[in-house]
Amino acid sequence: MLEIDNLKKTFDGGTKALQGVNLKVKRGEFLTILGPSGSGKTTLLRSINGLEKIESGKIFFEDEEINDFSLPNVQKKTGMIFQDFNLVNNLSAINNVLTGLLNSSSKFFSMFYLFTIEQKLKALQALETVGLLQKAYNRADELSGGQRQRVGIARAIIKRPLLLLADEPVASLDPKSADLIMSLIKKINKELNITVICNLHQVDLAMKYSDRIIGLLEGQIIFDQNSPNIQKKSIEQIYRL
Ligand SMILES: Nc1ncnc2c1ncn2[C@@H]1O[C@H](COP(=O)(O)OP(=O)(O)OP(=O)(O)O)[C@@H](O)[C@H]1O
Ligand SMILES: [Mg+2]
């Protein structure tokens, strides 16, 4: 469903964040990207949904090359979750989830919360999927970190994306909440058949939940293995410094 060919990205100032990444991801796969800080994990995810402009190389989403013309369609089919949740604190959980239905051209309507009954039902359903229906009308800032990330997930899945991009979704959470969030992402991956690409720092969680793990170092993929067969040597390679 996704193919990345020779993707390169150099930031102003000369940092070579990605140095020729090649990657194919199959529909339904749960892929984790491991790599030390600064290895390019976030840049890679952000290049897929257009938050970072593709400088050189190509990305194909469902066999369609991503460019300025096709990007809105890719964004419609892609959801993203973040380390720091990116919720609007003074909005209720359900309204945060509903913002997942907006594209930039419909931001105007968001100011008035002109959502239809169907959309509100979809939001409640997404909150139910993440086990947070009872908090639908609580403000985001009344929720715990784990609960906030569940709202973040509900916001990402309300539009039923084909692809879920997760950038260190559990980095701000305690180990128990982290495990719960990862199991939830896995459930969504399997039950809703949503392909997942997830950046992580925790090797144990990567091995427990993903089908496949790639190791990124200095903007290059240095291993690509199915997680049951992952070798200790590979892990040591990326964290060698
Ligand atoms: N907007 C930017 N401008 C300049 N340099 C950037 C920018 N964003 C990222 N970089 C640089 O690109 C490199 C890769 O950054 P990136 O955020 O992709 O790493 P990462 O693997 O996600 O790291 P972490 O694990 O700390 O989140 C780093 O050297 C970083 O400093
Ligand atoms: Mg990052």
Image: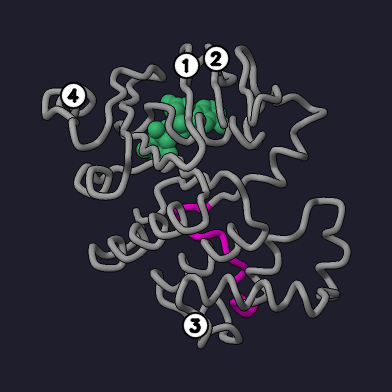
The verdict on residue 88 being magenta is yes
| Quadrant into which the C terminus falls | top left
- Taking the view exactly as shown, the residue that stands out farthest to the left is 232
Mark 1 to mark 2 CA distance (whole Å): 5 Å
Magenta span: 81-93
N-terminal of the two: label 1 or label 4?
1
Mark 4 to mark 3 CA distance (whole Å): 41 Å
Mark 1 to mark 4 CA distance (whole Å): 18 Å
The residue at 20%/37% (across/down) is 228
Dot 1 and dot 4 residues touching (CB under 8 Å) = no
Q: Is residue 214 above or below residue 185?
A: above
| Quadrant into which the N terminus falls | top right
Report the amino acid beneath label 1: Asn
N-terminal of the two: label 3 or label 1?
1
Q: Is residue 11 left or right of residue 213?
A: right
Q: Quadrant of residue 163?
A: top right
Report the amino acid beneath label 3: Glu
Q: Secondary structure at mark 2?
A: strand
Q: Secondary structure at mark 1?
A: strand
Tell me where residue 23 appears, x and y as whole percent. 46, 21
How dense is the environment of label 3, judged by Cα within 10 Å: few (below 14), some, or many (20 and up)? some
Dot 1 and dot 2 residues touching (CB under 8 Å) = yes
Mark 3 to mark 1 CA distance (whole Å): 42 Å
Mark 2 to mark 4 CA distance (whole Å): 23 Å
N-terminal of the two: label 3 or label 2?
2
Mark 3 to mark 2 CA distance (whole Å): 43 Å
